Image (spheres, grey):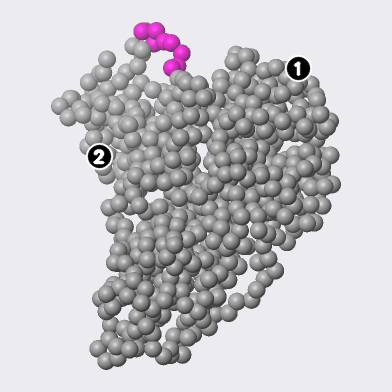
C-alpha cells in the first residue's frame, strides 16, 4: 500500500502572487507558450485555491517593444492596431482554454503607464540610475537607432548569425546591440553606423553582491537546476550596467526632462506589468494590492520560459531591491522549450500549433491538450510534441483509463440502483486498503505540485484512476451481482468514493473534466462540495442514498483522420517555407545580341549513361547531338538514375569549352532547371518529334 512521508516543503504561506510571463501581442498563443508557462502556472494556481490559499494569479499582454513595431511596419498599420488585434485574440483564447487568471491586463492600459512611470521616477529620484551618453547602432537610411530586434548579427557567445540586439534565441544569452559581431539593420539590411545618444542604465554590478547572496546562497537547493545554473553563469561572468531606456517612438515615455523621443526598455516596463495588473484587479475586487507585493508573508512565484530567466532572476529583482519596498520572488520555476514534430517551434515559419486553431479543430477538448502538454512538459530539458503522441495520450490514457473507469461506475450505479449511491455492507480487506490508498493521494499529488513537478503530479492523478480500474477489474461487480448483491453494493460504494476523489483532484490538471464529473456525480457547488483536504480526512466522500446523474463520456476517441489533418497542415507549412527560402539569383551582367549568337544550343538524345565512380552527383553520358556522339558529364545523379535518362531528348550547349571532370573530358552541357517543388528537370524536355542536331534559337 502506498505511503506518504510529509515534507517541510508542504508548510505553505496563505497568500500567493502567481505571475505568468506577459505574452507579446504580435501573434496568437501556441503550444510552446502553453507548455512552458501557462498550463503549469494554471495547475499551480488552481491547486493553491483548492487547498485554501489566497491567490492572485496575474498576467496581461506585453504591448511594447520592438517586435510590435516590426509587425506593424510589415503589415502597414499602427502599433496600436497590432496590440488591439492580438490582445483580444490572446485574451479570448486563454478564457476558452480555461487559464484561470484572476486578472489579465495589458501594458497599454493607463494604470500600467502610471505605475511604470512612477517606478522609474522613484529609482531616478533615489539616484539608482547611471545617465550616460554613448554610441549606439544607427541606420542612416532609416534615420533610426537600432534597438533590440531592429538589429541582427552574430552572437558573441555562441556564434549564432541571427542573434537579436538584446538576446540570442539560440543560446539564451542577453546582451547589448553593440555586442553583436557584423550587425545589420533588420529594417534596411544595411550595416549600421555608430551615433551618440543619451540613456539611463541600471547598474547591475552595484547589486551583484546582493544577488550572489540571495540566489547563489539562498536558493541553491530549491530553485530548478536550469534556472540556478543560468543565473550563476551570468553572475560569475560579472554583471554590467544595463540600459533601461530606448530610442523609439512606441512605448512608455521616459518621465524625466531631457528624455524626449525615448521610451522605457520593454524589459524594464513589462515585469512592472505584473504590479499594475495586480493593482487593477485589487481595485475591481476591493482588496489592498500592496499585500500581494509588499507583505513579507506573501510568496511571489514567476512562471516563465527559459529565455526569460535573466530578466526575472537578475534584472527585475535588482529593480525591486533598488526601489526598496517590494518582496522578491520565492521561486522562478522556468521550463525549457517545447519542439514540434522534431523541429523548433517557429512563429515566422508557421511551424506551430496555434491555440485559436486548436480550439476550433478540437471543440470541447481543452483538457486533452492540457493533459498531453503536461505529460510531456519540458520541465528539465527540451521536449517534443507530436500529434501521434497527443492521440495516444487521449485514446490510451484519458479514454481507456480515466474515462473508462468513470463510465463503468456511473453506468453500473444507474443500472443497479437507479443512480442512488448504495449502502455498503461489511468492507473486505481489499476495500479498506483501497479506501486508505485513496486518502493518501491528496498528499502525494501535493508533494509533487509544491516542488513544481507537474508531470509527476499528473501521473499520480492517473495512478488513482488506475487504482479504480484495477479495483473494478479485480472485484468484477458485473459477475458478482448474480450471486451476491450485498457485496456489489459495497464494491460500487467504494468505486464511487474513488470517483469523487478524482472529481476534485483532477481539477488543477483537467478543469473542464472536473466540472463535468462533478455534475455527473451531483457534487457541484452547494451539494456535497469537497475540498482537497476533505479527501484525505473524511471517511465518506459521497454518502449512501445520494442521487447521481446519468452517464456521459468524459473523453472521446480521436481518430486517425483528425490527426492527419493536423499533420497535413504542418506539411503544407514546411513546403511553403522551403519555397519561400529559395532565393532567386539576381540578373547577371547585360550581354549583347552578338554574345547570345555565340551559343550553339541543339537538341540531342542520351544514348548511354553510367554513374561516375566515387562521385555522388555525377553521371557520365553519351549524347547524340546530331553532329556527333560526345561524352558529357552532368551533375544530375541525385535526381535521376542512369537507367531512366537513357533515350531522353535533351537540350545541349555543344560549343562549351571541354572540361576535365575527375579524369573524364566533358564536351558540353545539358541544360537543366528546377520546378516549383525544387526538383531538377530538363529544359524543354519534350522534344519527341524533333530531330537531333536541330539548333535552338
The quadrant holding residue 194 is top right
Q: How many marks?
A: 2
Is residue 588 one of those drawn in magenta? yes
Magenta segment, prevailing SS (helix, strand or loop): loop
Position of residue 97 in the picture relative to residue 150 (left or right): left
Residue under circle 1? 258
- Residue at the extreme left of the image, as rendered: 689
Q: Residue at x 51, y 81 (%)?
A: 436
Give the CA separation, mark 1 to mark 2: 77 Å
Quadrant including the C terminus: top left
Q: Are marks 1 and 2 in contact (CB under 8 Å)?
A: no
How far across and down, in percent of the image, does residue 210 sit?
82, 47
Residue bounds of the magenta highlight: 587-595
Residue under circle 2? 646
How far across and down, in percent of the image, does residue 118 sit?
72, 30
The residue mark sitting in front, 1 or 2, is 1
Position of residue 122 in the picture relative to residue 338 (left or right): right
- SS under mark 1: loop
- SS under mark 2: loop
Amino acid at each position: 500500500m502506498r505511503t506518504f512521508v510529509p515534507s517541510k516543503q508542504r508548510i505553505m504561506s496563505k497568500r500567493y502572487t502567481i505571475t505568468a510571463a506577459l505574452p507579446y501581442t504580435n501573434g496568437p498563443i501556441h503550444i510552446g507558450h502553453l507548455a512552458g508557462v501557462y498550463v503549469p502556472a494554471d495547475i499551480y494556481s488552481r491547486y493553491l485555491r483548492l487547498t485554501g490559499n489566497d491567490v492572485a494569479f496575474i498576467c496581461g499582454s506585453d504591448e511594447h517593444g520592438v517586435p510590435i513595431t516590426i509587425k506593424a511596419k510589415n503589415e502597414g498599420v499602427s502599433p496600436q492596431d497590432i496590440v488591439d488585434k492580438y490582445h483580444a485574440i490572446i485574451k479570448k483564447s486563454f478564457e476558452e482554454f480555461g487559464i484561470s487568471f484572476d486578472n489579465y491586463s495589458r501594458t497599454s492600459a493607463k494604470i500600467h503607464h502610471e505605475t511604470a512611470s512612477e517606478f522609474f521616477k522613484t529609482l531616478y529620484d533615489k539616484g539608482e540610475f547611471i545617465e550616460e551618453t554613448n554610441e549606439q547602432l544607427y541606420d542612416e537610411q532609416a534615420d533610426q537607432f537600432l534597438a533590440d530586434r531592429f538589429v541582427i548579427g552574430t552572437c558573441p557567445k555562441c556564434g549564432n548569425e541571427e542573434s537579436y540586439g538584446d538576446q540570442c534565441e539560440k543560446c539564451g544569452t542577453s546582451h547589448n546591440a553593440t555586442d553583436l559581431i557584423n550587425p545589420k539593420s533588420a529594417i534596411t539590411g544595411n550595416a549600421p553606423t555608430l551615433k551618440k545618444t543619451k540613456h539611463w542604465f541600471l547598474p547591475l554590478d552595484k547589486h551583484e553582491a546582493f544577488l550572489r547572496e540571495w540566489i547563489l546562497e539562498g536558493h541553491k537547493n530549491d530553485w530548478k537546476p536550469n534556472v540556478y545554473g543560468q543565473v550563476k553563469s551570468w553572475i560569475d561572468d560579472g554583471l554590467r550596467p544595463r540600459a533601461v531606456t530606448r530610442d523609439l517612438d512606441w512605448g512608455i515615455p521616459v518621465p524625466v526632462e531631457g528624455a524626449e523621443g525615448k521610451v522605457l526598455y520593454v524589459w524594464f516596463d513589462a515585469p512592472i506589468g505584473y504590479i499594475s495588473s495586480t493593482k487593477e484587479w485589487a481595485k475591481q475586487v476591493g482588496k489592498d494590492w500592496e499585500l500581494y507585493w509588499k507583505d513579507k508573508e506573501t510568496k511571489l512565484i514567476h512562471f516563465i520560459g527559459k529565455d526569460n530567466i535573466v530578466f526575472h532572476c537578475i534584472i527585475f529583482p535588482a529593480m525591486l531591491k533598488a526601489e526598496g519596498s517590494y518582496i522578491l520572488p520565492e521561486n522562478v520555476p522556468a521550463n525549457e522549450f517545447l519542439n514540434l514534430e522534431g523541429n523548433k517551434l517557429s512563429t515566422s515559419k508557421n511551424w506551430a500549433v496555434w491555440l485559436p486553431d486548436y480550439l476550433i479543430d478540437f471543440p470541447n477538448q481543452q483538457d486533452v491538450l492540457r493533459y498531453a502538454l503536461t505529460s510531456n512538459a519540458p520541465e528539465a530539458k527540451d521536449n517534443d510534441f507530436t500529434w501521434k503522441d497527443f492521440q495516444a495520450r487521449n485514446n490510451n490514457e484519458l479514454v481507456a483509463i480515466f474515462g473508462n473507469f468513470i463510465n463503468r461506475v456511473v453506468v453500473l450505479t444507474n443500472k443497479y440502483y437507479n443512480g442512488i449511491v448504495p449502502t455498503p455492507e461489511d468492507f473486505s480487506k481489499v476495500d479498506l486498503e483501497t479506501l486508505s490508498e485513496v486518502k493518501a493521494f491528496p498528499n502525494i499529488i501535493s508533494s509533487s505540485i509544491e516542488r513544481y513537478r507537474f508531470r509527476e503530479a499528473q501521473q499520480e492523478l492517473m495512478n488513482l484512476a488506475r487504482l479504480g480500474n484495477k479495483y473494478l477489474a479485480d472485484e468484477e461487480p458485473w459477475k458478482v451481482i448474480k450471486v451476491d448483491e450485498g457485496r456489489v453494493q459495497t464494491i460500487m460504494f467504494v468505486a464511487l468514493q474513488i470517483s469523487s476523489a478524482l472529481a476534485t483532484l483532477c481539477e488543477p490538471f483537467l478543469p473542464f473534466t472536473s466540472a463535468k464529473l462533478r455534475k455527473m456525480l451531483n457534487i457541484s457547488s452547494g451539494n456535497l462540495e469537497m475540498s482537497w483536504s476533505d479527501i484525505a480526512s473524511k471517511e465518506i466522500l459521497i454518502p449512501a442514498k445520494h442521487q447521481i446523474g446519468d452517464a456521459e463520456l468524459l473523453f472521446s476517441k480521436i481518430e486517425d483522420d483528425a490527426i492527419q489533418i493536423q499533420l497535413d497542415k504542418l506539411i503544407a507549412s514546411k513546403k511553403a517555407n522551403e519555397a519561400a527560402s529559395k532565393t532567386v539569383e539576381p540578373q547577371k551582367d547585360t550581354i549583347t545580341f552578338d554574345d547570345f549568337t555565340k551559343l550553339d544550343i541543339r537538341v540531342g538524345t542520351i544514348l548511354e549513361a553510367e554513374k561516375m565512380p566515387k562521385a555522388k552527383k555525377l553521371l557520365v553520358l553519351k549524347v547524340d547531338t546530331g553532329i556527333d556522339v560526345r561524352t558529357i558529364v552532368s551533375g544530375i545523379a541525385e535526381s535521376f538514375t542512369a537507367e531512366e535518362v537513357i533515350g531522353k531528348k535533351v537540350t545541349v550547349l555543344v560549343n562549351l569549352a571541354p572540361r576535365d571532370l575527375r579524369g573524364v573530358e566533358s564536351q558540353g552541357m545539358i541544360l537543366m532547371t528546377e520546378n516549383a517543388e525544387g526538383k531538377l528537370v530538363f529544359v524543354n524536355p519534350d522534344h519527341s518529334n524533333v530531330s537531333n542536331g536541330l539548333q535552338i534559337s
